[in-house]
Structure formats: structure tokens, C-alpha cells
Image (tube, grey):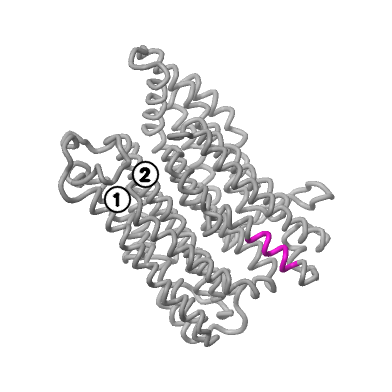
Amino acid sequence: MDHMLLQAVFIPLLLSPVAYVVGRRHGMAAVTWFSLAVLAYCTALVALAALDGGAEERHAWTGMFGEFGLALDGLASPFAIMIYALSAILAVYSRPYMEHKFAEQYREAHGEGGSAVALAEYVRAKSGTYHALYLVFAMGMLGTVLATNLIQFYVFFEVMLIPGFFLIAFWGDGPRRKIALMFFFWTHVGAVVLLLGFLAVGLSAGTFDFAGIAAAAIDPDIVLVAAVAIAIGLGVKLAAFMFHIWLPWVHGAAPTPISALLSPVMIGIGAYGMFRLIMELLPAAFSELSVWFHVWGLVTMIYGGAMALMQDDLKRLLAYSSISQMGYLLFGLGSQSVLGLAGAEMMYVTHALGKGILFMMAGVIIVRVGTRSISRLGGLAGRMPITATCAVIGALTIAGVPPTSGFMGEWLLFYGALETAVEEGSTLRYVTFGLGLVATALTMSYMLWMIKRVFFGKMPEGLAGTREAGWHMLAPMMALAGFTVVLGIYPDIFLGQIVPYMSGIAGAGELGPGTAAALAGAGAAAAPGGGA
């Protein structure tokens, strides 16, 4: 099939006006199936291209910026597949949650006296707008990951911001407009700093195309300053420590289906950018900065985990957990090891699965129980057994417990970090490795604490009538829960592409015996290359 990647990126954008019309005329059920069909088709295109060994498409653009290109390789494939797969699944989940949200806002505006006909018309009107913005949001994320040009990357990077802003401002909780402005301000300022780094690199290299930049001889001083600017800009999107302030507010306010996209997949695109733009295109700067990424990641892991332990609001707990999990990605990036880098990307997949389940669990509780306060919950496992089972699997995934995918991600991540510490004989890296293990204990603590208080123990008065959610909410959680177990047992689904790619980019020479044994144990194919 021709232009598979071009179709995958632009079909959701082109059909977003159709989604608007379908929602306005036929209601939430029809537009839900329409969005699901669009995203499922695009997910299939990306998956087929990945199974075929990747794809690259180039199109004429403008002489000022170079070519418009889309590339799916071993780095981009896991990100791209998770972005669209989760978007498709959450389109189904959105139906009952957003109907509940629309009805809630209608009652806030009109009181309980509004007619059922007027309420149905209100829901129908809002459903078209929601799904149109939703499709553009998903398209912006995929376009960023597939971009082969700095300016193109920046354009898609900013496209993510616009629908996200409106989705929060229109249908968020609390002071949603103020929080949407906070989201806009933080992420846009980060993007401007990112653009400054892009201009420094592109103008110095004489091209904005990735291939040209990788082959160009750029002044080392310019490269280092540009890499720092890029790292700061991406660090805001990643919500790494010091640039994380916006994330708990935004995730706490955003509609839960949007939180389940913002947290598991969107913020992780910041890590993708560091892999692609710093590690791959600016390797000299990456070598100098890697240990700082390592430390930055460790601080983010510990800070996010400690703050999660202090939360009573379920969604804010998950938001701080996301900050901590992004620290794992930075930690692995800074390991400068093939296995550490592969583990970091695997952690992105793990986070998408585990946190997607947990945010959907939070949405179920909001709809069925009507509160996000953990102290007001308890004993729900008996009333919501499927939700509880999925939530436990999601928590174990984030905590890195086998046989979930989280175990394989963390095992590779820490193996790589220790491998680099041993090879360099670095006391600092030994210390960060040990403290990283402490961070995993924090993760286990807040996850088990949350599960215990929400689903077990004594049920508070007033919750005895709580019932399980409908299949629109349960089926997406069950799909992700099943896949995280499958991926934990058979990680080659992604590692078969990730490890050879990381070996080619970060490796030099032959794989050491320890690395080769680790790859064999993971079931991944070891390619020529070794730990840097």
C-alpha cells in the first residue's frame, strides 16, 4: 500500500470535521464508532509498516526547511503503535465517561429542571466537538514521532498543544480554564526554548533534515548549547523535575480519557525527542550530558514517588506517578548502555499500558462512585471485581512485577545502568544505581497503598450500592491488562525492534558477554554493537 505513513498521520486530521458533523447529527454512539474506525485503520497501517521492517516516505516541501518526511524505524515504532492503539481504545472508553461529563456540565448550567430532550441535544452537540479535537490530538502525537525534519517536528509538537488546551478548557474539572492556560503556557514556553535549539542546530548545519544534521560538522560549542536548550524544551513536555509543576494540575483537571492520553503517551514524547534529537543527531553532546540525564532521571523518580505517597486525590496520585515514571526514562537514557536505552524505551510502552489502565480505573470510580478522594473509598473489589483486577494488573505493571511488561522494562533498565557503572568504575553511577532501586521501592509502596485503600478494607457507608461499569469502560481496561501480561511473557513484540536499533545507534564494537547473555535471556535478538 502506498503512502501508509502519510495516511496514518493525516486521515484523522482530514476526517476530524466529519467527526464533528457525525456527532452533531447522530450523537455520541455514532461518532464513537466513527472515531474508533478511523483510529483502528490508522493503527493497522502503522503496525503493518512496523511488521514490514519499518517505512520511510519523503515528499517535496519547501527549500527553506527541506523535505517533508515520515519515518518509522526501531525507535519510532513502539511510540507510534502505542500512541494510536491507546487512542483507539480510549475512543471507546470516552463514550460513557464524556456522556457523564456532558450531563454533569448541563446540570451545573441549567439545574435539575432541564428537560431530557434538551439534555440529549446538549450531549449530541458537544460529542462532535470532543471527537474532532480528539482526532487532531492523536494526529499531532503521531506526526511528532514520525517527523524527519526539525521544523516539521516542531509543527507537530505544537499541534498537540492546541486540541489538548481546548479539551481541558471545555470539559475539565475545577478551575479548568485557568489550568488549561497553565498547560498552554508551560508547554508553549518549553516549545519556544526547543525551537531556539532547533534553529541553532539547523542554521549551523545548513539543513533541518535529520539525515543532513547527522552528517554535518557543527561547532562543538554550538552543539552543546543547542543540546541543553533541546533538553530543557523536551524536559517541560516530559514533566521532569524542575519543569513538572504543570502536570499534577493538568492531569487532575483534564477529562479522564484525556488524562489517559496525556500521561501514558503524550509526555513520553519528550523522551522520544531526547532519543532522536540528542542521542542520535548530537552524539558528542549526548556523551557529555548523559551522566546529568542519569542524575536528573533519578531525582525525578524519587521526587515523583515521594509526592505520590502524599496524595489523597486519585488522579493527582497517578499524575505524580507519571512524573516518577518519566524519571525512569531519563535514567535509562543517561545510562549510555544498549540495554539501558532499550529498557528506557520499553518503560515507555510499560507506562502507556499500566497508566492507561489506572487512569481508566480512576474514571470508572469517578462515574460510578462520584469521588476521587482515596480516603472516601474502600472495599470496592467486591462490588467492582473486573475493575479491581485490571487495576491490580496496572499497578503491578507500573511497579515492575512479573509477568507484566513492567518487569522486563525495569530489568533491562537497571541491568544497563549497572553495566555502565561497572565498565566505567564510576562511583557516581554505582550510587545512582542503588538509589534507583530505592525509587522502585517507593513505586511499589504508593501503588500497593493505593490499591489497598481503594479496593480492599472496610467499605465506607454509602458505597454499598456501587455497581460495576459497563463494557465500554471495562473492555478497554481488559484489553490493556491482557496485553501487558502478553508483553511481559513475550517481550520480543517490541524488543525485537528496539534492541537492534539501540545497538546500532549507541553501540560500538561487539556486544560484551554480559550484554549478550542479557539479550538472550530477554529473548531479544542481539545485533552487532555494544554498550557505549
Residue 1 shows in this picture: no
Looking at the image, is 95 positioned above or below residue 197?
above
Looking at the image, is 272 positioned above or below residue 6?
below
- The residue beneath circle 1 is 390
Dot 1 alpha-carbon crowd within 10 angstroms: few under 14, some 14 to 19, many 20 or more: many
**Measured Cα–Cα span from mark 1 to mark 2:** 10 Å
What residue type is disc 2 on?
Met
Query: Where are the magenta residues, as a range?
Result: 223-231
Name the element at disc 2: helix
The C terminus sits in image quarter: bottom right
| Picture residue at 57% right of the left edge, 32% below the top | 16
CB contact under 8 Å: marks 1 and 2: yes
The magenta stretch spans residue 224: yes
From the viewer's perspective, is 101 left or right of 227?
Answer: left
Residue 191 shows in this picture: yes
Image coordinates of residue 469 in percent, x first then y, are: 28, 37
Q: Which mark is residue 360?
A: 2
Residue in the foreground of this view, choosing between 232 and 526: 232
Prevalent SS, magenta region:
helix
What residue type is disc 1 on?
Cys
